[in-house]
Structure formats: C-alpha cells, structure tokens
Image (cartoon, rainbow, N blue to C red):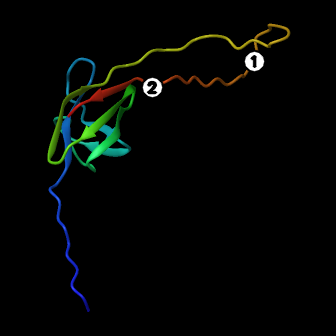
Amino acid sequence: MSAQGIELKPATTVVGRVLDERGAPLKAFWVSRESLETEDGRFELSQRVGMTEVTFEAPGLAPRIFQLDVKPGKNDLGDVQLGRGRAVTGMVLDAVTRAPVVGALMEAASKRAKSTSPI
C-alpha cells in the first residue's frame, strides 16, 4: 500500500441575499436549481474557482442569471433583486387565411438577461 498525498484547498463559496422587487427578503427561492428556504433571503453555495453561471429564481418572479468569476474564499454577491418580468400577449394567425388559430400553443423565448459580476 502506498501513501498518496491529499491536497486540501480552501473553501470557496458564493454568498448573498435574494430580495423581491420591493426589497423584502425572499423566504423560498432557487439558486442554480438548488431549492432554499430561509427567513432572511440569505444563501451560501459551494462553487469551483473560475467562471460559472449562477441562476436565481422564485415563483412568480423573473429569473436572473449571473456570469461569475469565482475567486478562492468567500465571494459576496450582496443583494440580488428579482422582479416580476414582463407579460407577452398576442394572437396566433393562420399564415394563409390570417384567421385566428383556436387552441394554438405559443412559446416565447429570448436571450436571457445576464449580469456579469466581478466578485
């Protein structure tokens, strides 16, 4: 049996607080698909050092996506505020007759707003 060295690296975390559009802390939300419940909206995630994408979501609010350059140690995002987003309305029309298409399903997609945070 041979001895192998184990290299321990310092803990790397991303911390902050998730707020609603009025500035009140959210008690239930997701950070990068991890479901969290807190009294004060605070979160702490273990992350690898380097570039990563972190997504914040909560029921009824628009998600926010951050591109982060995570450094060794504690990376503080501060307050992350989520808002309601925007509504999309319209009518689906037949391409030939221009008549409304009853029961049509629509999916809206766009480039998601991304924030870059040099933490």
Whole-number angstrom distance, CA of label 2 to CA of label 1: 29 Å
Q: Quadrant of the C terminus?
A: top left
Apparent side of residue 91 relative to residue 116 in the rendered image (left or right): right
Q: In this rendering, is residue 80 above or below 3?
A: above
Task: Kindly state the secondary structure of the residue where label 2 is placed.
Answer: loop
The structure residue drawn at horizontal position 20% and vertical position 24%, both measured from the top left corner, is 24
The quadrant holding residue 84 is top left
Task: Name the kind of residue labelled 2 in the image.
Answer: Arg
| Res 102 label | 1
Residue under pointer 2: 112
In this view, the residue in front, 60 or 51, is 51
Residue 94 percent location from the top left of the image = 79, 13
Label drawn at residue 93: none
Residue beneath the point at 14% across and 44% down:
74
Crowding around mark 1 (Cα neighbors within 10 Å: few <14, some 14 to 19, many 20+) is: few
Looking at the image, residue 107 lies above or below residue 9: above
Residue 34 x/y as whole percent: 34, 46
- Residue 40, picture quadrant: top left
Residue 32 placement: quadrant: top left
Which residue, as the protein is rendered here, is positioned at the far bottom? 1
Q: Do the residues labelled 2 and 1 touch (CB within 8 Å)?
A: no
Q: In this view, does 78 lie above or below 46?
A: above
**At 19% from the left edge and 76% from the top edge, which residue is drawn?**
5
Residue 73 in the image, given as x and y percentages of width and height? 14, 47
- Give SS at disc 1: loop
- Judge left or right: residue 4 versus residue 30: left
Q: In which quarter of the image is the N terminus?
A: bottom left
- Tell me where residue 57 appears, x and y as whole percent: 36, 33
